[in-house]
Each structure stands twice: as structure tokens, then as C-alpha cells.
Image: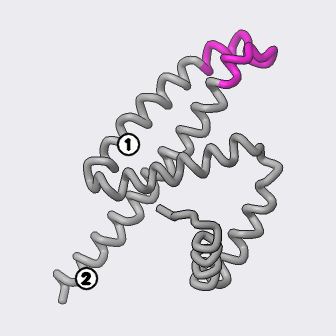
């Protein structure tokens, strides 16, 4: 009984750890994107201390992303590929369309929290209707 409980606790911990690492990777990628964008655009706000500390911060983000991504990737290569592909696709959507579309995404999230199975069925139906595939 205690072994079963320990196993359950360990599984919950591993799931939370994987979610935290994945979230960290996402946050690092988004921050890295905007950090790079500021540097590339030679933003008037990106001078002196911000430039100095921003460059150091960017290097640390790259190191953290590489280190953390390897841990996730090594644990389950196929799932990691699917998840990161979906995350990158989602990030690209947000970055291309700006944050003005975030309200729509927030509405989708609210409905999803209320009835995830129904939303999944609706999305699958629309994907089929438009001959699209999901990952």
C-alpha cells in the first residue's frame, strides 16, 4: 500500500516537474524572441544598462533553454517533438497576429475549462470539415 502511494506521489511529482520545465522552456523562448527583436530593431529603449544586462540575460536564457529542453527531450522524444511543435506553432500564431488576438484565445480557454470534451469534439469536427489535421 505504501509502495503504491509512493509511486502515485512520484508520478504526480514527475508530471508537475515536466509541466514546470515545459513552461520554463516556453517562457524562455518567448523572452528570447522579444529580447532578440529589441536588439535587431535597435530599439531606442535598448541602450546602456538594458543592452548590457539584456545581452547577458539573453545568453542565460539560451543556456537554460538548451539545458531544460534536453531533459524533457531525453525523457520522451516523440511526445517532446509533438509538444514542442504545437507550442512553436502556437507561439508563431501569437507573434504573427500580435497580442490583440489574445482576447479570442482567452475566450476559448474559458470555454475549454468549462467543457473540454465538447470543445475537443467541436474542434475535431471543424478540422475534419476543412480537411485539416491535428497533431
Magenta-colored span: 37-54
Q: Residues within 10 Å of mark 1 (few under 14, many from 20)?
A: some
- Residue at left offset 36%, top offset 71%: 12
Query: Which quarter shows the N terminus?
Result: bottom left
Q: Quadrant of residue 126?
A: bottom right
Answer whether residue 39 is magenta in the image: yes
Q: Which mark is residue 5?
A: 2
124 lies above or below 102: below
Q: What secondary structure is the magenta-colored segment mainly?
A: helix
Report, in whole angstroms, how far the alpha carbon at label 2 lies from the one at label 1.
29 Å
| Labels 2 and 1: the sequence-earlier one | 2
Query: Which x, y percent locates residue 107?
Result: 77, 69
Tell me what residue is drawn at x 28 percent, y 78 percent. 8
Residue 104, numbered label: none
Apparent side of residue 50 relative to residue 17 in the rendered image (left or right): right
In front: 111, or 97?
Answer: 97
Looking at the image, what colour scheme do you see? one colour
Residue beneath disc 1: 69
Would you say residue 45 sits in the magenta stretch?
yes
Residue 25 % position (x, y):
48, 44
| Residue drawn where x is 74% and y is 64% of the image | 106
Decide if residue 62 is on the left or right side of residue 101: left
The secondary element bearing badge 2 is classed as helix
Coordinates of residue 33 in the picture (x, y in percent): 61, 32
**Is residue 79 toward the left or the right of residue 57 in the image?**
left
| Extreme residue in the top direction | 48
Secondary structure of the residue carrying numbered label 1: helix
- Tell me where residue 66 sits by quadrant: top left
Amino acid at each position: 500500500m505504501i509502495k503504491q502511494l509512493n509511486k502515485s506521489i512520484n508520478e504526480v511529482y514527475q508530471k508537475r516537474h515536466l509541466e514546470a520545465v515545459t513552461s520554463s522552456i516556453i517562457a524562455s523562448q518567448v523572452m528570447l524572441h522579444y529580447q532578440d527583436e529589441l536588439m535587431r530593431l535597435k530599439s531606442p529603449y535598448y541602450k546602456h544598462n538594458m543592452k548590457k544586462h539584456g545581452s547577458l540575460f539573453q545568453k542565460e536564457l539560451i543556456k537554460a533553454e538548451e539545458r531544460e529542453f534536453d531533459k524533457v527531450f531525453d525523457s520522451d522524444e516523440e511526445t517532446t517533438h509533438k509538444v514542442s511543435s504545437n507550442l512553436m506553432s502556437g507561439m508563431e500564431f501569437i507573434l504573427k497576429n500580435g497580442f490583440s488576438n489574445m482576447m479570442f484565445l482567452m475566450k476559448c480557454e474559458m470555454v475549454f475549462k468549462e467543457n473540454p470534451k465538447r470543445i475537443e469534439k467541436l474542434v475535431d469536427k471543424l478540422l475534419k470539415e476543412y480537411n485539416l489535421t491535428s497533431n
